Image: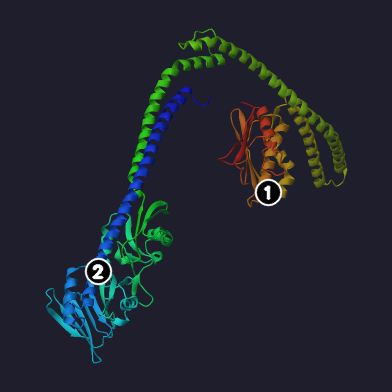
Amino acid sequence: MRYSLGFVLALSLAGLQFIAILIVVLTSYVSSERAILDHARGLMDRAGANAAEHTKRFLEPATEVTEQARRILDSGLLSTADTAVMERYFFELLSIEPQLSGIYYGDEAGNFVYVMKSDGPGPYRTKLISIEAGQRTTEYIWRDAEYSVVDRSFDPADTYDPRRRPWYEDARGLAARIWTDPYIFFSSQQPGITVAAPIHDSAEVLRGVVGIDLDIADISLFLSDLTVGETGAAFILSDDGRVIAHPDPARIGVRNADGTMGFIGINDFSDPIVRAAFADFKAQLTVADQPVRSEFEFAGAPFMTLLLPIPDIDLPWNIAVFAPEADFIQGIRDNRVRNIWFAVMISAVTGAVGLALSELILRPVRAFAVRTALVSQGEVSTGDPLPRTYKELRAANATLIEEIAARRRLDVKLQELNRELSHVTRVNMMGQMATGLAHELSQPLTAISQNLDTALSIAKMEEPANGELISILSELDEQAHQGGDIIRALRSLMRKDKSSTQPFDFAELVGQTQRLLRQELEAGGIAVDVHIPPLRMVIGNRVQIAQVLINLLRNAIDAIVGADSDNRYIRISALQFETHVEVRVHDSGPGVDPDIVLFKEFKTSKPEGLGLGLSISRTIVETGGGQLWYDEGAHQFRFTVPCETL
């Protein structure tokens, strides 16, 4: 096995402990999270119901005051023709109910009485429009809290006609109490709404309409104080998608195309979480007067939402509540993380204890295993006494020792047979190849050498002698003899007898190699830079070492030509050491591909290569007592050849 028994025992003990604690922690987390989420939904329900109830109570005074004024004016207890009495009555109502912004009455003749709260010069302002004999008069009166006149003025340019206002037209048309759509008050720039009711005489003939302006900014103030988790919020959303009230009132106003102020739509709201939560709110309003709960994700965080229609009011308003789940369950999540770390620490301690116990249990077993390994390696005799161990292991000792001894004998025989089989296979295969090559090439090479000798003799006898022709024929003769030597060396390499080694001048061998490769070097435009100091005679098979050098130089030529390098050169250098000469071959090519495994058969970067050159070259060098390797830092191949010693 890959791991020791002690490690497996300790890991199993700690792992089981960790899994058990983790199951308890996760089970507790899931149940606690579900309970807390249910509690959070209950909190949101209560927050929504609280906001709905507050809004309902906020709107009720306006409804009650409107109904009260309608009944008094309908009954004739208060004459609509007596503007002074009506002004005082409106003043008293306005001072009692703080959320009311103004109370007014307009009749069919265009007369108008409007008492409203003011910023000055007095806390209350009255606007009186009277039409007598076709003459229109508009007067403003400012009063203090005691109903005393503070200031008054007239506005002959005023053209306000209550009969043309939406609250008047709707109440007259429906003949019932109506609520207008919310709008932004022109004077205070605060959100508000109007409730209006028609006034009839005893014959049910319309005399006028009484209306009350209600400042709903206080609803936003209440919503800002309403706690929904840590970052949640509640706001009021109308059925047509407008935000009527929000904890931040400054965000709900928007300027319309005609320059007036209105309420912003939910899809245009500046808070992206609000847009994501209630973008499809109309689809959620499927059950009248029933809360609709849903969930959504924003930026990867889960949120909960509640949409609750406000009951028992004549307005199409809904309480919208949203809050992230993390506001309610982040604490339990943090506690879960702490519990998991606690489980990890307990498991680590348990694992350490288990490891110590397993060490005590396995110590005799380990001693027995060490002795068995020493016996198998031959370092301890099979007759030596056993260490103290369990009786079950003593019984198995004799059988195990005998099996080890038998296995060692069998391994020796198998190794010897494997060597013989490999040798026979190699000799058989390569011998056939070498014999065939030698047979096929020796005769043509012999004929070439004889013809070249004859041609050289004839060329030398001519007068005057052609030096260039003699040089070419001499080089051809040298290469023909070199080919014959290579074939004989290859045949000798694959045979079981030792290769012929003798001292030779390595610098001379380098020069001959250059001449052999001169055509390839000139064709590639490659210069050869040789730096070889005076060296002692190297010892080896001259032909085989030449083959190694030729293979390295041809690899360098192919690399330079394939990379299309501008600077083309090959540098051959040698260093003299005590027992050997180190040869270095460096080129200006791109270097060795890191994906290529060097010196391994059939691994090559050349499209037409076999991947045998470097493998054979290493075999030749190592057979002669040297080494062949690639220096990655210097980007060069190096090999060593034994040399004569002083």
Q: Secondary structure at mark 1?
A: helix
Q: Nearer the viewer, residue 5 or 98?
A: 98
Tag shown at residue 140: none
Q: Nearer the viewer, residue 510 or 552?
A: 552
Q: Is residue 111 left or right of residue 9?
A: left
Q: Disc 2 marks which residue?
A: 62
Q: Is residue 86 left or right of residue 36?
A: left
- Above or below, 279 relative to 131: above
Q: Disc 1 marks which residue?
A: 561
- Report the residue at 39% width, 22% height from top: 356
Where on the picture, by quarter, is residue 627?
A: top right
Q: Nearer the viewer, mark 2 or mark 1?
A: 2
Q: Nearer the viewer, residue 512 or 339?
A: 339
Where does the image place residue 343, in percent across and percent down from the top left? Answer: 37, 33
Where on the picture, by quarter, is residue 462?
A: top right
- Report the residue at 75% width, 27% height from top: 492
Label 1 crowd bin: few (<14), some (14–19), many (20+), radius 10 Å: some
**How far apart, in angstroms, are the residues tagged by discs 2 and 1?**
98 Å
Label 2 crowd bin: few (<14), some (14–19), many (20+), radius 10 Å: many
| Amino acid type assigned to the residue bearing label 2 in the image | Ala
Where does the image place residue 157, in percent across and percent down from the top left? Answer: 26, 87
| Amino acid type assigned to the residue bearing label 1 in the image | Val
Where does the image place residue 509, in percent across and percent down from the top left? Answer: 70, 36
Q: Secondary structure at mark 2?
A: helix
Where on the picture, by quarter, is residue 600?
A: top right
Q: Residue furthest front?
A: 203
